[in-house]
Amino acid sequence: MSSVAFVAQAPLNRKGGRPSKDDAELLGGKIIDAATSLFLSDGYGATSIEAIARAAGISKRTFYARFPDKAALLGAVVHQIIERLRPADVMPLFEGDDIEALLCRLGGIILHASVAPTALALHRLVVAEAVRFPELAAAVAGEGSRAEAIAGIAGILKRAVIAGKLRVVDTEFAAEQFMELVLAIPQRRALGLGTPMTEAQLACWVKDAVSLFLNGCR
């Protein structure tokens, strides 16, 4: 199973009384990190709150003081995974007039995020358990990262259509097709359904996918 490495957390303040805001946030992060490791290694269904509390070195009472249930914790876990994969400043990635350069840059960032070990582990988890635990798929969908990327790419295509560079009727549909063209096969191979691509192969894949996509839209 895939495993996740985490930055070591500083020791918590063990003084009596109500914890400070920083200590409360640190403890919440410690619970999320423990849950992430267990969810991705053992599965969502097989991971109990007791196991999470034990891994985090806390009591169940402390757990429930921060998360109402396992589903709420799952949402926090998914949010953290996606935020760690997301570029720090997203908006500049969608700016510029060179559509080929824009799509190559975006395609490369999205592709590398999709084949990162944590992203692959989350994908396996959702595929394996989403039928029994719909909250898994709901937590991923609730982050809206894919919808955000599609909307941004659709905006780039719309600008190119207005400028007369492309002929696209439905830019959102085209953006979805671009995402699938870039991601589907490399991610499938990274998941073990084929030989994973090297860094050089991934770079060539993005360039060729962008070229094929734009030739179909011109």
Image: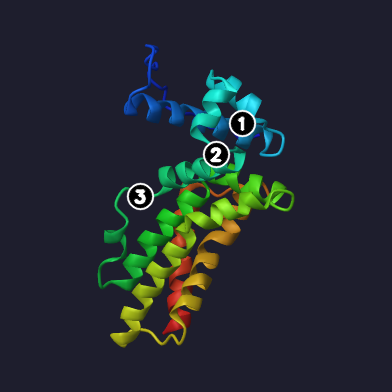
Instruction: Indicate the quadrant containing the C terminus: top left, top right, bottom left or bottom right.
Output: bottom left
Residue 154, image x, y percentages: 40, 74
Residue 27, image x, y percentages: 44, 26
> Up-down: is 110 above or below 27?
below
In-image side of 172 versus 60 (left or right): left
In the picture of the structure, the residue carrying the numbered disc 3 is: 87
Residue shown at the point (64%, 49%) measured from the top left: 126
Instruction: Indicate the quadrant containing the N terminus: top left, top right, bottom left or bottom right.
Output: top right
* Amino acid of disc 1: Leu
In the picture of the structure, the residue carrying the numbered disc 1 is: 38
In the picture of the structure, the residue carrying the numbered disc 2 is: 73
Residue shown at the point (29%, 60%) measured from the top left: 91
Q: Which label's residue is closer to the chain start, 1 or 3?
A: 1
Q: Residue furthest right?
A: 132
- Give the secondary structure at mark 1: helix
- Give the secondary structure at mark 3: loop
